[in-house]
Image: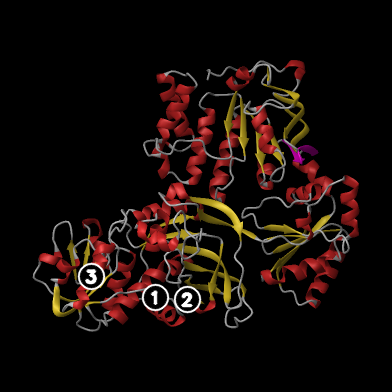
Amino acid sequence: MHSPSKSPAPPGGGGVIEARGLVKRYGEVVALAGLDLTVPEGTVLGLLGPNGAGKTTAVSILTTLLKPDAGTATVAGADLVGSPGEVRKRIGLSGQYAAVDEHLTGFENLDMFGRLYRLGAKRSRTRAHELLERFSLDFAAARPVKTYSGGMRRRLDLAGALVAEAPVLFLDEPTTGLDPRSRTELWDVIRDLVNRGSTLLLTTQYMEEADQLADDIVVIDHGREIAHGTADELKAMAGGERIEVSLRSECRLKEAMRVLARFSVGDPYTNELSVIAPVTGGAQTLTAALRALDAEGVELADVGLRRPTLDDVFLFLTGHVAQTENGSTTSTDNDEENPPARNRRRARGTRRSKEMTTPTTPTMKAIVQDGYGAPEQVLKLAEVDRPAVGGDDVLVRIRATSVNTPDWITVTGTPYILRLKSGLRKPSTPVRGTDVAGVVEAVGANVTDLQPGDEVFGSLWDSTVATSGAFAEFAVAPASQLINKPAGLTFEEAAASVMSGLTALNAIRDVGRVGPGTRVLINGASGGVGTFAVQIAKALGAEVTGVCSTKNLELVRSLGADEVIDYTEEDFTSGEQRYDVILDNVMNHPPTSTARALTPTGMLIPNSIGNTGGFFAGLPRMARATLMRRGSTDVQFATCVANRENLDALAEILTSGDVKVVIDQTYALSDAADAVAHMLGHHARGKVVIAI
């Protein structure tokens, strides 16, 4: 690599980026079919198109990663084919996926980029510090990138593209996979780049992104330009108005689309629970459409009449619905019911796929696991189909979930022996998470006591380690494992209470049969199950001793423990105190040693597999505890029994004020890998929550 140089004025007064007739073929597939582009200096060109339109191929050619089969192009005055080295001196590239080394720190990544650009050691270090501060990453400069959130990695990747201070930047779908907050922050960074004089070519599927950032927009499909203009000019092309109705239930989408198709001059399409239809006639058409929807019994949550957006333009031009925040968009292409739309498509020569003749399967964002290993390596945000709703099921729009032991066990695949059940190479179910709190979206035919719009919480747990999958925008749960969420609980509190709260309830109330005067010791009293167990035991009148680390002593006392033991200072198994029930959430002592702290009739409740490594990890200790049942020691096991009776009991103690939910940290869905890693460290105070 070479140090970048400022670009000379492009010949002929054209754009900083000039492309004419670019063609690229892969066998019989034509990725680009004669594409022309012009990007004036100091502006942003938005290159829009559906998946497979040719956006990334165009960027790859203009950044010298691919050679065109035909056509010419110059970038910052340098000929693309004749002088690719000169082009590379004058450009920066941020691809679809962050090209940073997760094992290096943020500073080390940028310093390495500077040295590869031959900036010299001193300038590389200076530039790295400048960019870390500029992108608000200086606080994490010394942290390995594997500990960064998705938004932080994206900002670091963009900073890497700026190390050489190139005058021309190519950003290929820079915000794909980011949560809305991180996306907005990155938009601010891009605006600042333009204000400083950079010229940008930006590819995106997000219409709002193009509307916010691009001075000029080129829409391509099948490798060809099909429209070109500013956002306002493109919106004017779609013309007319749009009726947009929001439904109370997803199950009535087809009926609503069928009704609105009678009034539409184009194809109705959906965006989550909304149906949008191009119309003429304004308020008169809207009134008639609402009457028809009411006659069909379609209940509406909201209705509006508006001017076209870029999303409408995208559909008008390509026949595809643009990517939204959660990707859950569909459209219909019924020529028999909608002749004007058929004629419009024929006039502009747009070919529509057979899959567009009926509404497509709704999709959602989810955290998908593609193997076993460290959370940041195997957990990725992806677009997947929404789960189907069975007759006894409920589709829940998830507002919050939490991380539990089965999640990190399945993510890491340890103990290895458990892979025999969950899947040898990767889990049989790709989405983790069992606790759910959210809003009912749809119900199965046999469900009568829950309705769309109800706020609920409960569990997907089916007693298998690889239960799927609440780390997502939607999940399907058996109706028998959901109840209405108490009004006094937040979604985060409700989600955090399910598996840990039910396990503690089973251990203390059902297995241990704890009552007034029962002497209870809880090892791991500051963890998820432990914080609930301390409070439930106190509510039942027990004398409670909690065992935890030094930093959590005050927390456990605040939960009501009569005595707190700092395990770094004292070994409870060697003390003189004896207990009627020991709930061991840590298993950091051999079970025979732990049993010495029991009264002659006392009960040991092991509730951990110990450490996370190796073929068996802590399973041998659980096995030894089981064998102790053959002797004089009473050893019993707790479990999470997710049914309405237990959920009702949990809700009652949560609303009584006797038990509070302890939440250590809350993460966004896009940062679920960080949430699991936090839990994997075994030092969480209470629960780790994922808010969606």
| Residue 192 higher or lower than 364, as above or below | above
| Residue 589 higher or lower than 87, as above or below | below
Query: Residue at coordinates 16% horizontally, 71% vertically from top-left?
Result: 595
Picture quadrant of residue 571: bottom left
- Which one is closest to the eye, mark 1 or mark 3? 3
Residue 166 lies in the magenta-colored region: no
Q: In the displayed structure, does residue 544 sit left or right of residue 408? A: left
Res 486 label: 2
Q: Position of residue 188 (x, y in %)?
A: 57, 40
Q: Indicate which disc, 3 or 2, sits on the residue closer to the N terminus.
A: 2
Residue at mark 1 to residue at mark 3: CA–CA distance? 32 Å
Question: Could you say whether the residue bearing mark 3 is in a helix, strand or loop?
Answer: helix
Residue at mark 1 to residue at mark 2: CA–CA distance? 9 Å
Q: Which residues are magenta?
A: 216-229
Query: Residue at coordinates 38% horizontally, 61% vertically from top-left?
Result: 418
Q: In the displayed structure, does residue 521 sit left or right of residue 668? A: left
Query: Residue at coordinates 37% horizontally, 62% vertically from top-left?
Result: 405
Q: Indicate which disc, 1 or 3, sits on the residue closer to the N terminus.
A: 3
Residue 217 lies in the magenta-colored region: yes
Amino acid on which the number 3 mark rests in the picture: Ala
Q: In the displayed structure, does residue 381 sit left or right of residue 555? A: right
Res 625 label: 3
Answer few, some or many: residues within 10 Å of disc 3's Cα (few below 14, many 20 plus, some between 14 and 19): many
